Image (cartoon, rainbow, N blue to C red):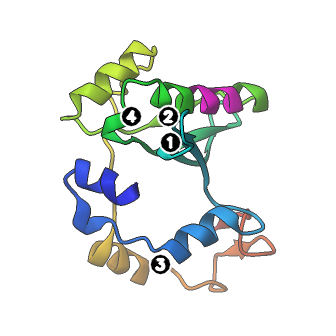
Amino acid sequence: MIRELAEYERALEHARATEEQLRDALFRENPAVFALVAEDDAGGEPVGFALWFLNYSTWTGTHGVYLEDLYVRPHARGDGHGKALLAELARVCVERGYERFQWWVLNWNEPGIGFYKALGAEPMDEWTVFRLSGEPLRALAAGAEAPGSAGESAAPGTSGGSRTL
């Protein structure tokens, strides 16, 4: 379904994740991402999914849910699967005290935008998404100070810590 979504978004060539990478991210001891799967009521066939992870707001001091992907197969659209996936993620937010549930949508995806607005979601038009990848990412990383150099103090461990540069 990830490849189906990439094709719908006109970016199939960018969908490079392997089954092994997804399995590791979703099912390791401390997962980095989480997923919900919608199944057809009749036969239990997977018809949609939502892939999400936690983010954090320094303004609210709470985690939130970032929806990376929401996809429902074309033949199952209109049957309530997308809304059920979003409702379950909203329930997770409320149950855990998360104050934000957010995602991106392509500007040309009018059906998606209309669906989200009908749920009460608000576009964040005053924000511009930036991405650094490929060679510009590597170039910027090359200019960073190496760990352990002057001016840096790192918290123990490799994740969840902070450091001062």
Magenta stretch holds residue 124:
no
Q: Which residues are magenta?
A: 87-93
Q: Are marks 4 and 3 in contact (CB under 8 Å)?
A: no
Residue at position x 78%, y 70% in the image: 155
For label 4, the residue is: 76
Please tell me whether the stretch drawn in magenta is mainly helix, strand or loop: helix
Residue type for callout 4:
Ala
Q: CA distance from mark 2 to mark 4?
A: 24 Å
Q: Nearer the viewer, residue 157 or 18?
A: 18
| Kind of residue sitting beneath label 3 | Ala
Say which residue label 1 marks.
67
- Helix, strand or loop at disc 1? strand
N-terminal of the pair, mark 1 or mark 3, is 1
Alpha carbon of mark 1 to alpha carbon of mark 3: how far?
30 Å
- Pointers 2 and 1 in contact (C-beta within 8 Å): yes
Badge 4: residue crowd in 10 Å (few <14, some 14–19, many ≥20): some
Q: Nearer the viewer, residue 55 or 23?
A: 23
Label 1 or label 4, whichever comes before in sequence order: 1
- Tell me which label, 2 or 1, sits earlier in the chain: 1
Circle 4 or circle 3, nearest the eye: 4
**Dot 4: element:** helix
Badge 1: residue crowd in 10 Å (few <14, some 14–19, many ≥20)? many
Q: Nearer the viewer, mark 1 or mark 3?
A: 1
The circle drawn on residue 144 is 3
Disc 2/disc 1 C-alpha distance (Å)? 6 Å
Q: Of residues 57 and 27, which is closer to you in this image?
A: 27
